[in-house]
Image (cartoon, rainbow, N blue to C red):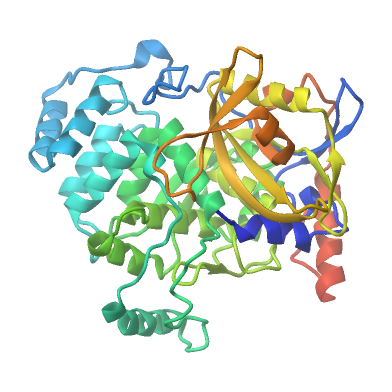
Amino acid sequence: MECFCFLIYIRQCVGVNVYSVGISKPSIYTNSVQNNQPIKASAQNQPAAAQALYAQNPIHQTAFKGAQGISSIRTTLATKEEKDKYSQLVANLDKQERKNLEMLLKNGILLNSDSNDKSSTLDSLHKILTNQRAAGLDNKMVLKETINTIANPFVITQNFGDIPQKYVPEVVNIAHKNSNSKDDGVNAKTINVERSGACVAASIEFNLAKQMPAEFARFAEQLSSPSLAVEKTIQLKNLANNTLDSVWLLNAFEVPYKMADFNSAKLTLAPDKNAILRAQIQNSNKDKLERSLVDVLMQSTFMNVGSQQAYNSLTDVRKGKFNQNDKGLIEFEKTFTESIVEDRNKISVTYQIVDENAKLTGYETDFKTMKKHITDSLAMGENVIIGYTQTDDKNIIINGHEITIIGAKQGKDGKMTFICNDTDDDKPNAIEYSEDYLLPKIHHAGLPQAVVEKDVQFVDNWVDGINAYKNAKSDTTGESPAQSPAA
């Protein structure tokens, strides 16, 4: 399916080093040792070396591990408190959700506490059931959707779903009150979102559910609470090489925060004001293959973070200083959001060479190196979010989309088949692409630093990245951008 945000990003950044426009961390240029071809990359959160996928599907080769490794997995309720919480959950679940809950206990996910505040998945699920939810959200429905999503993250979708006609006038009226304007772009037509630009946000949500289920449950609990916000403490080194640059980024993205100390900050992450309206609709009017209310709150939060708190869940339109278009998130915004959500470091590597006419003219490295980067990442237990493109018969990019590579298998012919998740294919399961099909389409990929550091030579380019953003802003608007460390 078509995802406009990536295509628009390619087109709007022509003539500019697209991955140095307002870079979210120290941007780096790298040179391939194999073929001496330049690879553009931006430093992202450095991953733990052995974060593993959990086994929920036969395609996964690595079992889920807790934060302390395989020995930390617990599959037995050890205390009276845990047993009581589990019993209360079971008593309020239907047959399918009970089976899913039992599966989460047996594979170690339910008692895993690899979350920002060390709460377990069980703790957060119990809070969802017993603590008050936001207005219009039902405890049991939030619980059901959270359990089902953690049990099978492939159900996550970016398909907005319709707003029943009987609710439209009220929804539009409330939206106008939220914005204090009737010129906010919200009307009966614009809230009928048929093609979502939330592929990045949905991919980040999928990764959170797949890689950090206890943290996903904590997000779901707090975002669906009356506060409609989740607090997260992050390490500032995971945003930039020094604290002042990290603080600048938080201010530039307008993320509310309090400094915990010189090395860390407590952030408040929240969806836009209209997200609750979408969530309330999905609470009682969700159709097959539409987003759940949890999807709504998660994706709206991630879109809001990436768009500098300027997203509108009703229209799927965003504003903000870093993107000239009103759909989706560009790479700078995507990697900042991913860094915040996962609180760790990755490298965003650009593989395709695209000219000023959005024409694919070549590649920064060979497909063998590209494949090695991906398979080495998978061997570390890391999913790889990629941006891929589609071209016409003249090699002009006509479409782009973000998906997640979660596994790979080698055929008898030596060729690799990649196992992927696509949040926009209306299929709540994994899909497969051959290497011959997928590798030529990959524009960029988010990779662990450890995977690419042996192939490339790193050069810090933080100042150049900010200056590129300043120049692009000045060229397109004639205005000076927000004050930055490079100013």
- At horizontal 34% and vertical 47% (from top left) the residue drawn is 220
Q: In this view, does 441 lie above or below 253?
A: above
Q: Where is residue 332 in the image (x, y as percent from the top left)?
A: 69, 51
Q: Is residue 470 left or right of residue 163?
A: right
Instruction: Identify the residue at horizontal 31%, vertical 34% (top origin).
Output: 151
Nearest the eye: 410 or 53: 410
Q: Locate the C terminus and report the quarter of the image it occupies.
A: bottom right
The answer to whether any part of residue 114 appears in the image is yes
In the shown orientation, is residue 347 left or right of residue 255? right
Image position of 81 with respect to 219: above or below: above
Question: Residue 111 is drawn in which quadrant?
Answer: top left
**Position of residue 64 measured from the top left corner of the image (x, y, whole percent):** 40, 21
Q: Against 448, is 174 above or below?
A: below
Q: Which residue is drawn at 24% across and 33% down?
A: 122
Question: Which residue occupies the foreground of this view, 62 or 42?
Answer: 62
Image point (82%, 25%), residue name:
456
Q: In which quarter of the image is residue 172?
A: bottom left
In this rendering, position of residue 175 left or right of residue 146: right
